[in-house]
Amino acid sequence: MSPRGVPVPDVRQRLFDAAERVLGAAGPDGLTSRAVTTEAGCAKGLLYNHFADLDEFVAELVLDRLRGTAERAEALPGLAGRGTVAGNLTEAACSLLDAHAPAVAGLAMTRAGVSARIRAAMAAGAPGFGTVEVAVVGYLDAEKRLGRVRADLDADSVALAVVGTAHHLLMTSWAGSPDPRDALRRLVVALVGGPG
């Protein structure tokens, strides 16, 4: 445990990582500020030094994870011409379903204050599913120029289908349910063809 008054390096990330571990072990009902700070090995009040309340903390956790996913997706157009189209697209889409993503999304849905904060941040331009969709369109357009997908492929519709399905799977997955990435892989192959 960090002693009082000693700075904790990268405290936000440390608390976010701890929250994901708590969610994985205890589910949304187990996520409390005390559980998070205990898991992070820091003082109980540290969370409130950086966030107004637990809802703000959870909203920032969700937005941080969406930002990371969006940043990974923005690299997708740079993969044009490498690997397989279905494989590249599947990997990008499945990143939306990483590790504790369903538990984090479920937590956001169960807390009205969190949902409102996330919507406000998205309206103000925070990266999220829309950013991923734009990256998928850019990637598919680049692959069309290289002749690796059909020239008449509707990149906008494919991007909407892939990101929308990932969002649906994210919101309807729970511990013990089948791995949602398998359904996403099948969808990508059905839309663009080729090996996933």
Image (cartoon, rainbow, N blue to C red):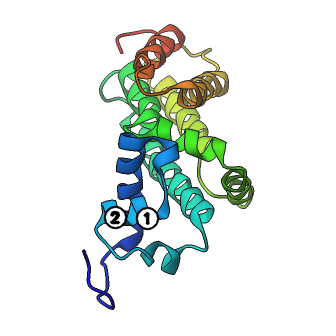
Residue 28's x, y, as percent?
51, 44
Q: Which residue is mark 2?
A: 38
Q: Which residue is mark 1?
A: 34
Q: Is residue 1 above or below residue 108?
A: below
- Is residue 45 shown to the viewer in this render? yes
SS type, badge 2? helix
Contact between labelled residues 2 and 1, with CB atoms less than 8 Å apart: yes
Q: Is residue 170 above or below residue 161?
A: below
User: Which quadrant of the structure image shows residue 113?
Assistant: bottom right
Q: Is residue 189 above or below residue 114?
A: above
In-image side of 114 versus 65 (left or right) = right
Front one among 133 and 57: 57
Residue visible at 45% across and 33% down in the picture? 97
In-image side of 3 versus 124 (left or right) = left
Residue visible at 37% across and 38% down in the picture? 99
Please tell me how crowded label 1 is: few (under 14), some (14-19), or many (20+) other residues with Cα within 10 Å: some
Front one among 79 and 69: 69
Residue visible at 35% across and 49% down in the picture? 21
Residue 46's x, y, as percent?
43, 77
Amino acid, disc 1: Arg
User: Which quadrant of the structure image shows residue 196?
Assistant: top left
Amino acid, disc 2: Thr
- How far apart in space, not on screen, are marks 1 and 2 (Cα)? 6 Å
